[in-house]
Amino acid sequence: MSIHARIAELGITLPEPAKPVASYVSYVRTGNQVLISGQLSNDANGGIKGTVGVDVTPEQAAEAARLCGINLLAQINAAVDGDLDRVVRIVKLGGFVQAGPDFIAIPAVINGCSDLMVEVFGDAGKHARSAVGVYKLPLGFAVEIDAIIEVK
């Protein structure tokens, strides 16, 4: 089954890749790797904003991380000219959670994205990762995730 068919089977429609809002690019390809800039927990409905453990629940935060994953998939798709079957491996995810002072379940939040990568790419979706709680994220979004991808 192709990766696009797997994404459709999961009921996911890839959005248009987000355009950069400052002095950077959405992705860089170097050799057989693609480095994807941080993707926010944004969607057509405005996404998930707020502070996890304060005004965003852990469950909402995991969904926010999944939104980041969908946005990563859109950027990866752009980087491989629409052929997601060129993805060899999700190498690493870097996850950032806008966390309240008492919220420590940061890895559980980032699982929302990690689980999606395994659902989409199978074993090739298993990756190394970081999961970090931060004071603030751009534009008030709850989660931001970047990625390193190996491609053919």
Image (cartoon, rainbow, N blue to C red):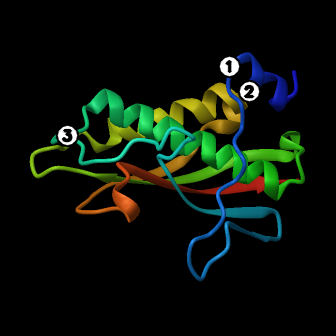
Mark in the foreground, 2 or 3: 3
The answer to whether 78 is drawn above or below residue 114 in the figure is below
Amino acid tagged 3: Asp
Q: Which mark is residue 55?
A: 3
Query: Do tag 1 and tag 2 residues touch (Cβ < 8 Å)?
Result: yes
Closer-to-camera residue (96/56): 56
Distance between mark 2 and mark 3 Cα atoms: 30 Å
Distance between mark 3 and mark 1 Cα atoms: 29 Å
Distance between mark 1 and mark 2 Cα atoms: 5 Å
| Sooner in the amino-acid sequence: mark 3 or mark 1 | 1
Classed neighbour count for the residue bearing mark 2: other residues with Cα under 10 Å, few (<14), some (14–19), many (≥20): some
Closer-to-camera residue (139/10): 139
Classed neighbour count for the residue bearing mark 1: other residues with Cα under 10 Å, few (<14), some (14–19), many (≥20): few
The x, y position of residue 80, in whole percent, is 85, 54
The answer to whether 109 is drawn above or below residue 51 in the figure is above
Q: Which mark is residue 119?
A: none
| Residue behind mark 2 | 7
Residue 64, quarter of the rendered image = top left
Is 32 left or right of 97, judged from the image as shown? right
Q: Helix or strand or loop: what does disc 3 sit on?
A: loop
Is 78 left or right of 103, judged from the image as shown? right
Q: Which mark is residue 10?
A: 1
